[in-house]
Amino acid sequence: MSVVHQLLPGWLLDHLSFINKINYQLYRHHKPCCSKNEPTSSVHSNCLQMDSTSFFGASATLIASDSTTKPENEDSRNCEIPTQKYVFRSELFNVTKPYITPAVPKECQQSNEKEDLLNGVKKEISTSIIGKKRKRCAVFNQGELDAMEYHIKIRELILDGSLKLIQEGLKSGFLYPLFENRDKCNEPITLPLDTCNLSGLCEMAKHLPSMNEMGLQILQLREDDMTVTEQDLFSRVVENNSNFTKMITLMGQNYLLPPKCSFLLSDISCIQPLLNCGKTFDVIVIDPPWQNKSVKRSNRYSYLSPLQIKQIPIPKLAAPNCLVVTWVTNRQKHLRFIKEELYPSWSVEIIAEWHWVKITSSGEFVFPLDSPHKKPYEGLILGRTGGKTTLPLRNTDTEVLPIPDHKLIVSVPCILHSHKPPLAEVLKDYIKPDGKCLELFARNLQPGWTSWGNEVLKFQHVDYFVALESGC
């Protein structure tokens, strides 16, 4: 379970545990010598099998493997032999110290902040590598004044609720006191090189023949040792409906696909296959690439304008009473856009605002709570296409619980950019048990979810995992 503690303020999550409970166990399929040689089915689409030459000149190899199911007896037609087990790299969650520590006592910092707000002046004190302090004074712009006003409104909620969850985490041993972490070796972490450049491949895939014109909308991956081309994977919904973990090789890079997942690797201009697959969803989680100054400077990923975000076809993807959850930065411009323009354009009624609070493994905020620059929390805006009423479940007398406002999700963040904590377990009480779930602008896959984005396989790269045991 990713939920370590659940209290009235919200949840303390273990993101790493959520990933590893998927059990990325690869198996190799063999037929016993006493079994009959029967033909097996191949990788196929919902309409017909595609035999094409890759636009990119290389093939994407599919290796099917079982994540949970082992042979029931020796008379089974196929035997599964374990070959390799993977777990997500734990050091990617090794956040033992705050990214920025307060340079002045908390009491003084809080008092100074209120005084500075009244005077319309911001003072940022930071410690350089050689230990000298620098002070910078400037006038708050309107956006910063709005952000400060918003922060003052939710500050006590964030502080009090987080401390209760952090205390439970320390009591249970999930979080560790700072002095215990000091003894841990903080070795530099080597991250995988983005040699595949998924977003770049999606851009190139626009020059391929339209899959929709050929009637090929869904590619179902079923058997082992099958080969499909890169062209097969682009701009089509790919489904792994089996209980098997699968590994695909795309442009020489290996990616792990959990069981019971589906994905569409494309940019926003090629989202049509998701509409054509005939599904609507009971939960839609959206993590838009918001425009901001740091993104522009780093050129880390492309961003969308508000107009482009509004054009996402949520009304066509949403089932009746669909729960829509949108991640938002602390920039008030984006928050107002969601509330005043985006959700109304989708006919989504806002019902709650939650907050993700990022802490270290010692229970400290990753940024000072009252920092004028970075905050240790982000927002989630929740709404429904059908409003605030409770929902009767199919064939039961149970009702979906109404969604409370201002819940906290507290967790140690992954050091990978934009690797958000899982929402599946915290949302389960507010959706139907058999509800279909969709994540837009995803960078990883989840069992039971459909994921879409131009980097949808990014964090499924095998280099983000550790091989625990070699196969036979």
Image: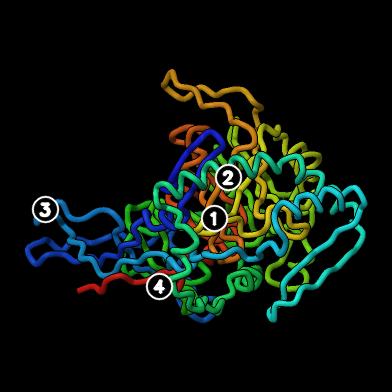
- Residue, disc 4: 61
Q: Nearer the viewer, mark 2 or mark 3?
A: 2
The image quarter containing residue 33 is: bottom left
C-alpha gap between disc 4 and disc 2: 45 Å
- Residue drawn where x is 75% and y is 55% of the image: 109
Name the element at disc 2.
helix
Residue 212 visible, this angle: no
Whether the residues at callouts 1 and 4 have beta carbons within 8 Å, the answer is no
> Of the residues under marks 3 and 1, which one precedes in the sequence?
3
Whether the residues at callouts 2 and 1 have beta carbons within 8 Å, the answer is no
Q: Nearer the viewer, mark 3 or mark 4?
A: 3
Amino acid type, mark 3: Asn
Q: Say left or right for 367 vs 132.
A: left
Q: Position of residue 138 (x, y in %)?
A: 90, 63
Numbered tag placed on residue 162 in the rendering: 2
C-alpha gap between disc 3 and disc 1: 41 Å
- Residue, disc 1: 215
- Residue, disc 3: 73
The image quarter containing residue 386 is: top right
Amino acid type, mark 1: Gly
Whether the residues at callouts 2 and 3 have beta carbons within 8 Å, the answer is no
Name the element at disc 4.
strand
Q: Say left or right for 167 vs 223.
A: right
> Of the residues under marks 2 and 1, which one precedes in the sequence?
2
